[in-house]
Image (cartoon, grey):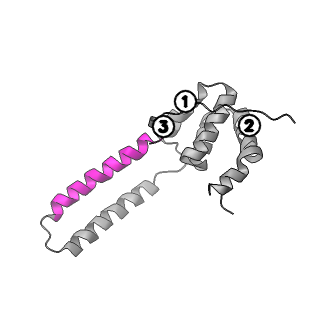
Amino acid sequence: MAEQIYSVPEMGPEKATPQKESLEIEELKQRLEKLESQLKKEQTPEKKGERVKQEIKSYLRELQQTPSFAPSPSTRDEAEEIAKFEPNQQVGSLISLVFEKGLPEAISVARDLNNPAILDEFHDALVDHYYQEMIERKILKF
């Protein structure tokens, strides 16, 4: 079997910070600012700290209730962007995504491409060429 080379397109800094993540951070900041204004009335720092912890915990629970089968907007955007590349560049982009954003995100984007051949080639490349590196970087844990 001949060794296949996958080219990895350059990804700018805008790809490093997902838009969804920044929106979630902004929403949490707004909620904490609102809580802070309410807490100015509180007397003890212990009560303030406890209320802030509860607000963060509540927000995280809301995020966890989002169905995992619904692709995030950033996942759809990534898939649309990667779909514009040549097939070997698509696989290379997906591999880059594994190391930038993690395996679950890359798999989600690969599925959103709706191309079984690319998904299969992506799987083969990971297993044949990147398996050990994913273990070393603790992307896969055994």
- Badge 1: residue crowd in 10 Å (few <14, some 14–19, many ≥20): some
> How would you classify the magenta stretch by its main secondary structure?
helix
- Residue 48 lies in what quarter of the image? bottom left
Question: Which residue lies most toward the right here?
Answer: 1
Bounds of the magenta segment: 16-39
Question: Percent x, y for residue 83?
Answer: 60, 28
Name the side, left or right, on which 4 lies relative to 12: right
Label 2, label 3: how many angstroms apart (C-alpha)? 23 Å
- Badge 2: residue crowd in 10 Å (few <14, some 14–19, many ≥20): some
Q: Which residue is mark 1?
A: 80
Q: Residue at x 14, y 64 (%)?
A: 40
Upstream in sequence: badge 1 or badge 2: 1
- Residue 92 lies in what quarter of the image? top right
Does residue 38 sit above or below 124 in this rendering?
Answer: below
Report the number of discs: 3
Q: What SS does tag 2 mark?
A: helix
Q: Which residue is mark 3?
A: 15
Upstream in sequence: badge 2 or badge 3: 3
